Image (cartoon, rainbow, N blue to C red):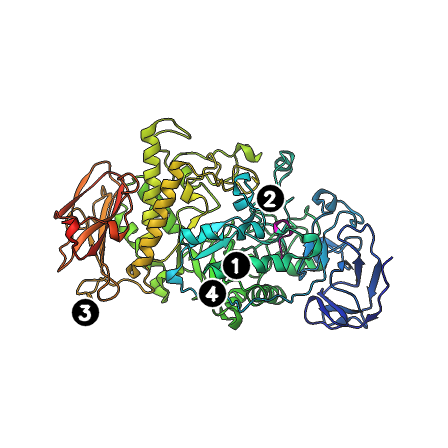
Amino acid sequence: MAEIYSIKTGYPYPAGATANPNGVNFSIFSRHATAVELLLFETAESPEPFQTIQLQSQVNRTFYAWHAFVENLPAGTWYTWRMDGPNNTPESGQMFDKDKHLLDPCARAVSTRLWDRKQACLPGDNVRHSMRSMVVEDHYDWEGDVPLAIRSENAIIYELNVGGYTRHPSSGVRHPGTFSGLIEKISYLRELGITHVELLPVMAFDEQDVPSGTADLGLQNYWGYSTHSFFSPHPGYCVTPEQGTHIQEFQDLIKALHKAGIGVILDVVFNHTSEGGAGGPIINFKGIDSEIYYHIDALNKTVFRDYTGCGNTVNANHPFVSNFIVDCLEYWVEHMHVDGFRFDLASAMARGEGGMPLRDPPVLWAIELSEKLARTKLIAEAWDAAGLYQVGCFPGYRWAEWNGIYRDAVRRFLRGEKGLIGDLATRLCGSSDLYHPEGRLPINSINFITCHDGFTLIDLFSYNEKHNLANGESNRDGCNHNLSWNCGVEGPTDNPAVQAFRIKQVKNAFAILLLSQGVPMFLAGDEILKTQHGNNNTWCQNNELTWFDWNFSEDKREILRFVKSMIALRKRNPSLMRRRFLSGQKHDDTHLPDISWHGAQIDQPNWNDPEARVLAFTLAAATEGGTHLHVMLNMSDSKVEMELPPLKNLSWHTAVDTSKPSPYDAVCPAEQRRHKRKFYTVEPKSVVVMESSESKWWNL
């Protein structure tokens, strides 16, 4: 039988459960609650609390904070809240239910061992089906670790799912699908050459948040865009979550990645929560102050405004909610040492009262201006599910954006569309049309061709149509506008010519991505030809369809080698990683324009040719004595003799030619051969890169 603990008034700040040598202070915000209870449990699965503490409004309430101090209560205690208040939802928008056990929104560790989403949607006491929060202490030895300060122009981002990266039996890790498992793969990440991992959501999310038809197939929420506890690492990614080790296990991952020189960007979901719409469960925010936390329809307050496609939209610009979000981000930087955040459907966070977009959204500016986040990377998915599209005009200066315009232009060029070279040139140079007018920089553009949402890279060249029947929604889900090309055959083929062509297209895509100004990002698995068999919406597929397969066939090793070589080429050429926009002007240190454009002939780009599918450009070395680059892109169906620009006291050496077999498709400087002719034959659907160098006698 657990001890019964004495109670003191407590303090309103900080929110959540804060342990000290004398006990634990609990504080939770609710403006409209009329009665509040704190319930203490021995374990995450205890059927009943060992102590229920009724807070008194005259004693345990300060402004809108309800608080109590439990003397001598040890860390490791599990707890929930219960609240009562107005539940006349059509008039008030509130959904108070005195029978529902609520998670602490600021909980540092949560358990989902008892969680049953279906049961939670039913009326009545949910103590046997609820999630639980845990009191934890954070006394971690960081061994001098601090968030990394990798400049954005030097960044190469690798997007991965923590669970799926090591869950495949071939991973060979001790704890598949966990933060610990990912630590065992850091050597691979370091050898690949990326500078940052961008982790799909790792804040605690509801794996059961799927439509009924999807659940009937045994599928679950895999990507993690269904957050309920924004301060807690996801228990499903922990080895011993029942012991409340969430924080330490995540900190171990961050420290290990930092030791390898790899930064960590978290994909965060502040646009909606796992509570869904009116029919969804009460987990925390709905039962604490629904109308404050969510956008509610003004005329019928039973209706949740949905700008996210997920049933609800967080009311991010309410003063308290805005403060909650900023506090959360600062916590993950200060206490977890993360290096940046990518904000899912970030444009939903730009909406104010009535759901209308705000010119200067308080929450976005609060994030931008936070001193504690001053060295933190901020990346917006600059659109939402209700038509707000802000690529190039997302509020704020520091914010980088997933550049969907870059993605679409490159996809169209790769599949052979004509007359795109003017737009393509703009994208290759960092999308100055989007960012320069407001004084922003190429580093505001996150360049990508694929990501978790959509086709993988090999599928982009293997399927014209999505094939999502496995998701249980009759192929209705997922994007229909893929700008893909199956290279003549839908899906798998035994035709060696088609297979080789698809692999070349993958190389072309990686080459263009890593030759572009801005910040490149690519999807984990694309470097080994990972296929999802045409499924472009694998959010619910926690299985071998999505898991990273560590069995590398010869063609996978070929692509992996090529990607490593392209990353190395980017890193050794500062001209590909400029912080500011190229001007086309000559610089004294190189005696060449920083960039010059060409077609098949030097200085003759075919800007006005509606049939053009050929483009070339020369990048001057960023520093005196550095390497010049000459890039030739031919997405036409014919080989093209392309003129090379003359060099003074230097020669062109072939670094990349995607038409050549491995290992001649990408060659390190020591093995490059001098090209002696004035022209280079660029094969159809190929990318060629030349690097300048002094002539070596063995290459003459």
Distance from the alpha carbon under mark 3 to that under mark 1: 43 Å
> Which is more foreground, mark 3 or mark 1?
1
Distance from the alpha carbon under mark 2 to that under mark 1: 28 Å
The earlier-in-sequence mark between 2 and 1 is 2
The residue where tag 4 is placed is: 148
The residue where tag 2 is placed is: 221
**Residue flagged by tag 3: what amino acid is it?**
Asp
Distance from the alpha carbon under mark 4 to that under mark 1: 12 Å
Q: Is residue 129 magenta?
A: no
Position of 398 with respect to 27 (left or right) is left
> Which is more foreground, mark 2 or mark 1?
1
Q: Secondary structure at mark 2?
A: loop
Q: Which residues are magenta?
A: 231-237
In the displayed structure, 587 sits above or below 127; it is: below
The earlier-in-sequence mark between 3 and 4 is 4
Distance from the alpha carbon under mark 2 to that under mark 3: 56 Å
> Can residue 576 be seen at all in this image of the molecule?
no
Please identify the quarter of the rendering in which residue 398 is found: bottom left
Distance from the alpha carbon under mark 4 to that under mark 2: 31 Å
**Residue flagged by tag 2: what amino acid is it?**
Asn
The residue where tag 3 is placed is: 588
In percent of the image, x 38 and y 48: which residue is there?
407
Q: Nearer the viewer, residue 548 or 368?
A: 548
Work out which residue is located at the far front of the displayed protein and give it: 698
> Which is more foreground, mark 3 or mark 4?
4
Q: Is residue 234 magenta?
A: yes
Please identify the quarter of the rendering in which residue 526 is found: top left
Q: Which mark is residue 256?
A: 1
> Can residue 254 be seen at all in this image of the molecule?
yes
In percent of the image, x 40 and y 30: which residue is there?
490
Q: Are marks 2 and 1 in contact (CB under 8 Å)?
A: no
